[in-house]
Amino acid sequence: MITITHFLVVGAWLFSIGLYAVLARRNAILVLVGIELMINAAILNLVAFGRYDSSLYGGQAFALFAIVLAAAAVAVALAIILNVYKHHKTVNPEDISDLKD
Amino acid sequence: MDMQTIVFYSLAFAAVFSAILLVSLRNIARSLFLFFVVLFAVAGLYLFALADFVAITQVMVYVGGILILMLFAFMLSNREMFRQLQRGTAHFIAIPVWQALPIAILFLTVMLYTALHVGRNEPPWITASREAGTVIRAADNTVEQLGVHTMTHYLLPFEVVSVLLMMALIGAAHLARKEGDA
Amino acid sequence: MPVPTLTYPLLATLAAVLMPFLAFLLTAATGKKARNGAVSIAAISISLLAAAYVFAHVWGKDPIHVQWHWFSIGRQAFHVGLLVNNASALMLLLVCLVALPVHVYSTAYMKGDPGIHRYWAYLSLFCFAMLGLAVAGNLLLMYICWELVGFASYLLIGFWFTRDAAIQANKKAFIINRIGDLGFLLGIAILYSGFGTLDIQVLFGTDTPAVSGTGNLTPGWFTAAGLAFFLGAMAKSAQFPLHVWLPDAMEGPTSVSSLIHAATMVAAGVFLLARVFPLFDGTVLFVIAVTGTVTAFAAACFALTQYDIKKILAFSTISQLGFMMAGIGFGMYHVALFHLTTHAFFKCLLFLCAGAVIHEMQHVKQKLGHDFDPQDIRNMGGLRKHMPITCATMSIAALALVGFPLTGGYLSKDALLVHGFEWAATQHGMALAVPCALAVASMLTGFYSFRLLAKVFFAQPAAGPLTGSHATLHDAPLPMRIPMLFLAACSLFPLFTFHPLNDGHVWLLRGLAPDATLPPLRLLHFAIPILATIASVIIATVTWRWYVLGKYPLKPQGALYRLSLHQGYLDALYMRAIIPPLMRLSAVLFWLDRHVVDGFVNGLAAGGRALASAAAWADYRVVDGLVRMTGKLALGLGNALRRSQTGRVQHYLALAFFLMVVMLLYFIFARA
C-alpha cells in the first residue's frame, strides 16, 4: 500500500536536492534546474494530498497551474540568464555580486 | 510486497538517485539529460497519486517544453558561453559545497520528520475526507472532473494563469532580444 | 579679616619696598642693555622719598600694621603683612639713605664692567629684600626676605664669578648663613607652636606682647627660641665664631661691600634681635652680651695686622657688630640700633673711600703694568696729596669709627660703653669683664683705624709701585665724590643731636627707648666719654709716631702678631677640626642615605613600580582587554555581518533557507 508518507518522503528528498543545487552549484542553468526540482517536489506533494479531495480536485488543478507557472518561470529565467551572461560574461552566481553595495 | 510497491520504489529511487547525480555532475549537458530521467520518474509517481492528467502535462510541458528550452538555451547560445559552461569538466563529481550541504540536510531532516509525523498522525481533514468518501479512486475519470472544475470553480485562477503566462512569454521575448533590436 | 584700607603711608611703604623689585624685574628683562643703572637709581630714589614720608608719618606715632590673608593650612591662616613702627621706619629710611649714595657711587666705580647689567639687577633685588625685611610684619615674611637678602648677597659676592676666590667666598657666605637660617627657622617654629601666630605685632607688640604670657611653652622653650633667633642673627651679623664669611665676602665689588657687608645686611641680625627683643630672657641676653663682646674684641685684634684694606674694614665691621650685639645683650636695643645707624653711615663711607683708593691703585696697576695687589696697604702711602677729598672724608669716617667727639660714632659708642658699665653694675662681679673688654676693643679700634689712615694717606710710600708715578694719581670722579661727601656729612653729630658731647639728647634714642632702662650711673656719663677721648688721642699719637714717623720697628715674627694676622687661625681650625669630621659625618650620612634611606625609598619605589606594572598589566590586559574585546567583538560581528553581505544570490538564499529551517524547527519543537 502506497501511503501519503511515501510521496512526502520522495518529495522531501527531491526538494532537498533541489535546494542543494540552488545553493551550491556554480552555474546559473543548474541553479534553475534546482528550482525546477523543488517545484516538482512541491507538485508531487500537491498531487499526493489532492487524492483526498475528489469534490474539487484542488490538488491536481493547482498542480497543473504550478506546472504552467514553472514553465513561464523557466522561460523568463533563461532570458535573464542570457542577459546576465551578456552583461557579466559569466553565468557563475559566485562571480556576480552586484547586490552588494 | 506487491508489484505496485516495487514499481513505486523503483520510480522513487530513480528520481532521487538521478537528482543526486544531477547536482553532483560537473558536466552540465549530462546534468540536463539526467533531469529528463528525474522528470519522467516524477511523472510516474504522479500516476501513483492517481493524477494521470498531471503526469501527462508534466511530460508534455516539462520534458517537451522546459527541458527542450533549456537545452536550446544551452546549446544555441553563443560559443563563449558554451565554452564557459563546459569548463571544468576535469572532475566527474563536483566538490560538495560545505555551506550548502548542512542546510540541505537540515531541510531534509525537518521534512522527513514532518512526513513521518503526518504518516503517524493523520491530519483531521484527511480522516474526514476518508470518512466522507471524497477520496479519488482509481476508477474515477480525473480528466473530465478536472476539466469541469477548471472551467467552473477554478475559472479565475485559470484566467490569471493565462494572463501571467502571456506576460511571461512577452517578458522572456523582450529579455532575450538582441541589443539594438526595437 | 577685612581688607585693610589703603592709606597714604601704607601705599608709600609698599612703594618703597616694591620699587626696587620693579627695577630688578625691568633690569633683568632688559638684559645686557641695562648698563647705566638709571632704572635702579630712579627706583631707589623713589624708595628714599617714600621712606622719608613714611618715617615722618610713623616716627613717634602709631605704627602702621596691616595684614592680608595669604594662605591657609587646615585651620591655620597665614598672612602677609606690614608692620612699620619706629624701628622699621628707621631701618627703611636708613637702607634707602645708604643705598642711594652707593648706587650713585657704583655708576662710576663699576663703569665698564662687562657684567654691569647683572650688577644693577642684583643690587635692586638686594634693596627690595632688605626693605622688605625691614617692614615685614610677620615672621614668615621676614624669613623669606631674610633668605632673599642672603641670596642677593650670595649673588653679589660671587659677582666676579670667574675668580675662584669669589666663588669660594660666596659659597662660604651662603653655607654659614644657612646655619643662621636654621636657627631663625627653629625660632619661628617654636614660637608658632607656642602661640599659633607669627604676627610680630601680636607676638612682640608694644603694650601686651604675646610672649609676655607663656603660651603653651615652658620657660626652657623661651630660652631655646631666644637662642635660636640669636643663632640666626649670629650668622647674618657675623658674630664670633660664625664671622668667618664676612672677611672673605670682600671678594665682591667694594661698593657691594659697603652697602651689604657694612651698612645693611649685616645689620639685619641686629634688627631682627631688636624686633623680637621681648622674647629674650636673662640667659639669652647674657649669652648675647658675651658673644657680642668676644666678637668685638677678637675682630678688633684681627684687624690690627691685616694688610688688605678691605679686610681691615671687614674686621672692623665685625667688631662694631659685636658692639651692637653687646648693646642688645645689655637690654639697650635702642642704643644698639643707634650705633647701627651711625655705623651704617661711617662704615659705608669707609668702604666707599677704600673703593676710591682701590680704584686709583687699579688704574696705576693697569698703567704701569706692574703686578701688585691694589688692595694691599703696604703698597700705598702719601695719597693725601693726590686724593685730598678722599683723605678728608675717610678721616672723618675713621674718627667716627674711633668715637671722636663731634662725630656720630662718639655718641653711639660711648653710649654703648656707658650702658655696658651700667649693666655690669646690675650683674655679678665677673660681668665687669664685659664692658672692660669692650673698652679695650674700642681702643684697639682706634689703633687699627689710625694705622689704616697713616699707612694709606700720611706715611711716605714704601718702595713700591707708587714711588715715581705720582702724576697718574688723582681724586675720585664726581659720581664717587658726591656720595662720599654726603655720607661724611651724615657721619657727623648734627644729624642726631645738636648737643655734640651728650648722648642724652639724641632724638633717635628717645624715639626707640624701651620702657625699662638700666639705673643710670651719672658719673659714667661724664667719665667714660672723656676717658675714651683721651685714650683715642694717645693712641692716635702713638700710631702717628709708629707708622708715619716710623719710630717703632715692627716685629712680624711675634706669636701674637701671627695669631692676629691669621685671624686667630680660626679658618685653619675650621679646616682641621670641623670640616674633616663633618666630611666624615657627611660620608657616613651619605652612605646611610645611599644605602638605607635611598634603599628604603628605592624599595618603596620598586614596590610601587611593581604594583604599577601589575596595575598596568591588569589595566592593559583586563580593563583594556575588556574594552578591546568589546571592540573586537563589534569589529568581528561587523566583519561577519559584512561578509554576509556578499552580494551573491546563493549566500542570501542560504541564509534565508537556514533561517527557515530554524523557524520550522522552532515550530516543530514548540508544538511538541
Image (tube, coloured by chain):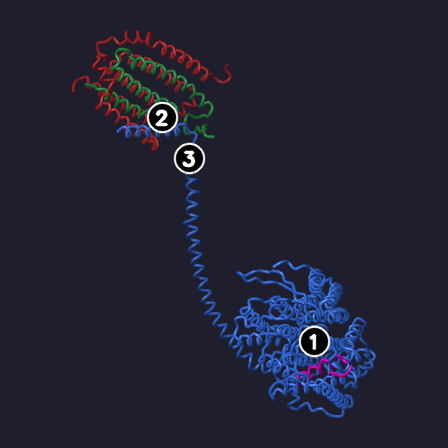
Chain colours: A green, B red, C blue
Query: Was residue A1 drawn as part of the magenta stretch in this picture?
Result: no
Disc 1 versus disc 2: distance between alpha carbons? Answer: 111 Å
Up-down relation of residue C26 to residue A22 (above or below): below
Vertical side of C126 occupied by A95: above or below: above
Which quadrant is the N terminus of chain C positioned in? bottom right
**Residue C80 location, quadrant:** bottom right
* Depth order, front residue of C144/C492: C492
Question: Would you place residue C245 above or below residue B158 in this image?
Answer: below
Q: Which of marks 3 and 2 is in front?
A: 3
Occupied quadrant, residue C84: bottom right
The kind of residue tagged 1 is Ala
Q: Which mark is residue C262?
A: 1
Q: Which amino acid does label 2 sit on?
A: Val
Residues at marks 1 and 2 touching, judged by CB atoms closer than 8 Å: no
Residue C2 visible (yes or no):
yes
Q: Name the residue under label 3.
A: C641
Residue C642, how many percent across, how many down?
43, 35
Mark 3 and mark 2 in contact? Answer it, CB < 8 Å. no
Residue denoted by label 2: A22
**Which residue is drawn at the image coordinates 43% and 54% (left, top)?**
C615
Could you tell me which chain the residue with mark 1 belongs to? C
